[in-house]
Amino acid sequence: MRRTILFSITALVAAATLTACGGSDDDTPAAADDTPSAEETMAEETPAADAGSTDLATAETSLGTVVVDGDGMTAYYFLKDTKDSGASACSGDCATAWPAITTESDTPTVTGVTGEVGTITGTDGAKQITIDGRPIYTFAQDTAPGDVLGQGVNEVWYVIAPDGSEIDD
């Protein structure tokens, strides 16, 4: 029962923040039915590889091989970011739902990522990692390595392939 209540609360908070960070031009929130349940997603996915001590690595998911952070969590692009602008367009509630992937180093350590990796100063002042000049993020509703629940949210969030391209399946 406690788990069900916690999941329900988490889903409500996430739904409220999604509207603030990537809704369509008419600000219509994504329908709740568009996102598979955690149980459905877990059943469809292959667990992600352990990223170990690197900032970025690759792992297998239901969408194929994708970029993951140092904890094995799926990395996403935000289409409202401008490539090579040196800035993130995701702040406030958006940054709560879509935490930036950060590093302590000017040269992040990577395994398996062939896109050009760099950093920018994120909205919170930390060094946010970029791939091919685009800031990258995780999704707060992805709770385990291999989760890809953020894929296609509001048609502005997409998983990243190792070569830096976005996966739009």
Image: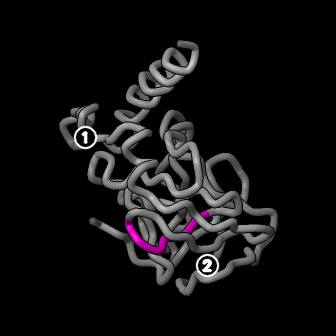
Label 2 Cα neighbours within 10 Å, binned few <14 / some 14-19 / many ≥20: some
- Nearer to us of marks 1 and 2 is 1
Residue at 61% x, 78% y: name it. Answer: 117
Query: What is the chief secondary structure element of the magenta stretch?
Result: strand
Pick the quarter of the image with the C terminus.
bottom left
Q: Is residue 121 visible?
A: no
Q: Which residue is mark 1?
A: 34
Residue at 40% x, 26% y: name it. Answer: 16
Give percent across and percent down for residue 54. Answer: 75, 71
Q: Which label belongs to residue 117? A: 2
| Distance (Cα) linking label 1 and label 2 | 32 Å
Query: The residue tagged with tag 2: helix, strand or loop?
Result: strand
Q: Quadrant of residue 116?
A: bottom right
Question: Which one is in front, 41 or 125?
Answer: 41
Residue at 73% x, 74% y: name it. Answer: 108
**Is 104 positioned to the left or the right of 44 in the image?**
right
Q: Which residues are magenta?
A: 63-68
Q: Is residue 109 visible?
A: yes
Residue at 47% x, 78% y: name it. Answer: 164
Query: The residue tagged with tag 1: helix, strand or loop?
Result: helix
Reply above or below: 57 against 115: above
Give percent across and percent down for residue 168. Answer: 29, 66
- For this orientation, the residue located farthest to the front is 43
Look at the image and say whether residue 61 sits in the magenta stretch: no
